C-alpha cells in the first residue's frame, strides 16, 4: 500500500512541477520569475533567469536528463553576470551559486559530456565561480562581514547600508568552501570563514545573536534572538558545514548556540523570540521559516525534540492548509499583515528528514496533506501562486523560484525513499560514479548535503579535488626541491598542506585539456605507490 501511495504521489508531484515549469518557459523566460495570475514574467533578484537556474537540479531529481542537458547548455549561452544590476549577496549565493554548483556536480549523472578532470573543472563550475566573484567585493569590509547588496558590475555602492541580517553574514560556507575545494582558489572559503568568525565574536554574554547587525561597527541594530527569519540559515550552515567539511569547530559553534537557544527561547517545544542580552521574550510568535529546525535537529540525532516541535508546526498547517508567515502562539492565530504562505518548503524539508530518520508514516501523511493543499489552494492556469492570505485563500501574483527548487524537490524526495540523493541507489543503476583527473575518485555514493535552497552538494567531490590540489602542490614542491642547490630547500613542509595562494582559478578553460604532471600519484585501490629518486610507479599488480 505504501509503495502504491509513494508512486502515485510522485506522479502527481511530477505533474505539479511540469505545470509550473512549462508555464515559466512559455510565459516568463528569460525573466527571473513567473507571475502566475497574469501569465507573464518579472525580474526580482538580479535578471539572470533565476527560476531556470534554481530548477535545473530538480529536473534531474525527477529523472529528466534530456531537459537538464538542454537547460544547462542554454544557461551557458544566455546568462551573463557582468551586468549593471544590484543583487542580493545572500540570495545570489544560495540560489545562483548553489544551483550552478549542484548542477555541475550532477552533470555526470545527467549524461552530459564532461571535461577531463571533472568534477574539478567544467563550464557550470566556471559559471558558479564567475557569479561568486561578483559577490566578493561585498566582503571587503573592516570586519569581513559582507554588505547585503552588491552591484554585479560596479561592486558595492558608496551609499549602501552597512546593516544586514545575521543569515546574510553566516550563510556562505557551503557554497564558498565547495568552490575553494573544487577550484583550488582559497579566496572563497577564506571570505566565508572570516565572516563566520566575525559574527561568532559578536554573540551576547548569554550566547545569543540578534537579527540585524552593522557589519562595519559590529553593533547589533535589531536585538531579537530566535531561529526564524533573518537568522535561520546561519545555524543551518554551521551544522551542514560541519558535516560537509568534517569541521569540528563549526559543530562546536552550533552546540554553543544551541545550549543558549534551548535555555532562553524554547517553551513547550515552540521557539520564541527573546532579547539577545537579557533572554526576555519579545515576540511569542512562530514564523514559517523556523520549520526547518526539526529537520536540522534530526541531522544531529535529537529526534525526540524534533518530533515534538514538528507536531506543533503540523498543527498550524492543519489549521490553515499552509504555514502563515507569522503565527501567534498565545492567540493561536495569524499575525496581522503576516497571513500569507508563499509556498515555502521548510516543513516539507523537515518531514523528509524525519521520515528518513524514523520511518513514521505520519510524515507521509503530512506530505499528502501538503500536496492536496497546494493543488487546491495555489494552482492557477499558469502555475502556482503564493497565497496572500491563508484565512480566505486569496492569491498573490508571484511564484518564487524556490517553489521549483525546494518545495517540489523535498516533496518528491519524501515519497522516494530509494532516490540516489538519499544514498539508496539500486545496484546497477549507477549509484556511484568515477571522477577526478585519473578517474580515481568515487563520487555520488551518498551523503549529499543540501544547501538552504535545496541544492545538493557531494562531499566526495570536495575531497577528490582537494586531494588532487594537495598532491599537485606536493609534486611541485618535490620538483622544486630537486632544482635547489644543496643546503637550500623549498617552502617549509608545514606549508605544503595549504591551498594555493593565488587568486586565479585552476579550473580548466573551454577547449583546454588537463595535462598530467611529470609525476603523478593516482589513488588506486589495492595498489602501492613507490618512489625512487622522485620517480613514481603506480602501475603495480593488485594484491591477491
Image: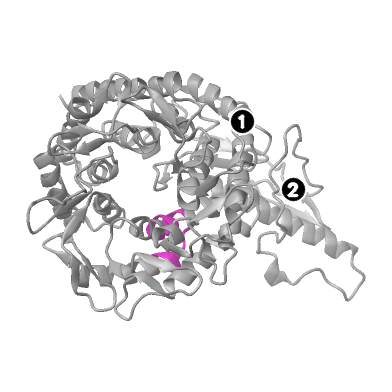
Image point 51% across, 54% down: which residue? 149
Which type of secondary structure does the marked residue at label 1 adopt?
Answer: helix
Which residues are the magenta region? 238-252
Which residue is denoted by mark 2 in the rendering? 520
In the picture, measured across the screen, residue 372 lies left or right of residue 186, that is left
**Residue 39, numbered circle:** none
Q: Earlier in the sequence, mark 2 or mark 1?
A: 1
Q: Main secondary structure of the magenta part?
A: helix
Say if the magenta span includes residue 239: yes
Local packing at callout 1 (Cα closer than 10 Å; few below 14, some 14-19, many 20+) is few
**Residue 76, numbered circle:** 1
Say if the magenta span includes residue 143: no
Residue situated in front as seen by the camera: 229 or 59:
229
In the picture, measured across the screen, residue 417 lies left or right of residue 263, that is right
Which type of secondary structure does the marked residue at label 2 adopt?
Answer: loop
Point out the image quarter for the N terminus: top left
Image point 15% across, 42% down: which residue? 317
Residue 41, compared with residue 530, is above or below; it is above
Residue situated in front as seen by the camera: 479 or 71:
71
| Numbered disc total | 2
Q: Give x and y (percent) for residue 13.
A: 28, 25
Amino acid at each position: 500500500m505504501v509503495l502504491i501511495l509513494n508512486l502515485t504521489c510522485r506522479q502527481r508531484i511530477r505533474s505539479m512541477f511540469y505545470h509550473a515549469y512549462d508555464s515559466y518557459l512559455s510565459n516568463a523566460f528569460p525573466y527571473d520569475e513567473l507571475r502566475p495570475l497574469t501569465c507573464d514574467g518579472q525580474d526580482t533578484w538580479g535578471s539572470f533567469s533565476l527560476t531556470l537556474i534554481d530548477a535545473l537540479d530538480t529536473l534531474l531529481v525527477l529523472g529528466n536528463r534530456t531537459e537538464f542537458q538542454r537547460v544547462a547548455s542554454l544557461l551557458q549561452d544566455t546568462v551573463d553576470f557582468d551586468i549593471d544590476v544590484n543583487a542580493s549577496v545572500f540570495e545570489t549565493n544560495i540560489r545562483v551559486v548553489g544551483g550552478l554548483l549542484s548542477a555541475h556536480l550532477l552533470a555526470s549523472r545527467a549524461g552530459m559530456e564532461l571535461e577531463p578532470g571533472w568534477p574539478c573543472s567544467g563550464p557550470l563550475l566556471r559559471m558558479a565561480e564567475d557569479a561568486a566573484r561578483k559577490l566578493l567585493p561585498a566582503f571587503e569590509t573592516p570586519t569581513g562581514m559582507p554588505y547585503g547588496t552588491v552591484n554585479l558590475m560596479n561592486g558595492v555602492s558608496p551609499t549602501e547600508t552597512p546593516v544586514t541580517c545575521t543569515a546574510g553574514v553566516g550563510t556562505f560556507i557551503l557554497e564558498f568552501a565547495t568552490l575553494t575545494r573544487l577550484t583550488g582558489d582559497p579566496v572563497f572559503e577564506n571570505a566565508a570563514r572570516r565572516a563566520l568568525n566575525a559574527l561568532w565574536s559578536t554573540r551576547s554574554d548569554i550566547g545569543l545573536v540578534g537579527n540585524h547587525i552593522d557589519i562595519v561597527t559590529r553593533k547589533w541594530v535589531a536585538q531579537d534572538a530566535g531561529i526564524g527569519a533573518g537568522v535561520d540559515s546561519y545555524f543551518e550552515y554551521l551544522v551542514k558545514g560541519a558535516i560537509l567539511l568534517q569541521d569540528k569547530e563549526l559543530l562546536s559553534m552550533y552546540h554553543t548556540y544551541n545550549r543558549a537557544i534551548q535555555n532562553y527561547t524554547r517553551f513547550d517545544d515552540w521557539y520564541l523570540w527573546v532579547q539577545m542580552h537579557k533572554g526576555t521574550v519579545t515576540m511569542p510568535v512562530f514564523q514559517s521559516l523556523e520549520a526547518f529546525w526539526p529537520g536540522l535537529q534530526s541531522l544531529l540525532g535529537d529526534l525526540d525534540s524534533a518530533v515534538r516541535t514538528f507536531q506543533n508546526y503540523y498543527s498550524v498547517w492543519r489549521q490553515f492548509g499552509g504555514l502563515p508567515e507569522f503565527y501567534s502562539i498565545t492567540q493561536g492565530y495569524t499575525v496581522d499583515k503576516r497571513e500569507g504562505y508563499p509556498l515555502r518548503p521548510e516543513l516539507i524539508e523537515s518531514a523528509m528528514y524525519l521520515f528518513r530518520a524514523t520511518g513514521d508514516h505520519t510524515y507521509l501523511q503530512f506530505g499528502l496533506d501538503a500536496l492536496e493543499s497546494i493543488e487546491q489552494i495555489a494552482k492557477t492556469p499558469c502555475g502556482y501562486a503564493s497565497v496572500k492570505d491563508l484565512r480566505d485563500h486569496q492569491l498573490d501574483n508571484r511564484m518564487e523560484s524556490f517553489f521549483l527548487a525546494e518545495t517540489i524537490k523535498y516533496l518528491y524526495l519524501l515519497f522516494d525513499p530509494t532516490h540516489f540523493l538519499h544514498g539508496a541507489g539500486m545496484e546497477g543503476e549507477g549509484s556511484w560514479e568515477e571522477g577526478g583527473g585519473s578517474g580515481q575518485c568515487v563520487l555520488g555514493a551518498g551523503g549529499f548535503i543540501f544547501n538552504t535552497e535545496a541544492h545538493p552538494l557531494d562531499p566526495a567531490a570536495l575531497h577528490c579535488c582537494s586531494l588532487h590540489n594537495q598532491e599537485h602542490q606536493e609534486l611541485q614542491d618535490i620538483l622544486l626541491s630537486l632544482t635547489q642547490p644543496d643546503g637550500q630547500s623549498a617552502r617549509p613542509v608545514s606549508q605544503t598542506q595549504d591551498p594555493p595562494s593565488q587568486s586565479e582559478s585552476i579550473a580548466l578553460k573551454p577547449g583546454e585539456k588537463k595535462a598530467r604532471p611529470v609525476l603523478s600519484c593516482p589513488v588506486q585501490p589495492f595498489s602501492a605507490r613507490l618512489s625512487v629518486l622522485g620517480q613514481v610507479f603506480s602501475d603495480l599488480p593488485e594484491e591477491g
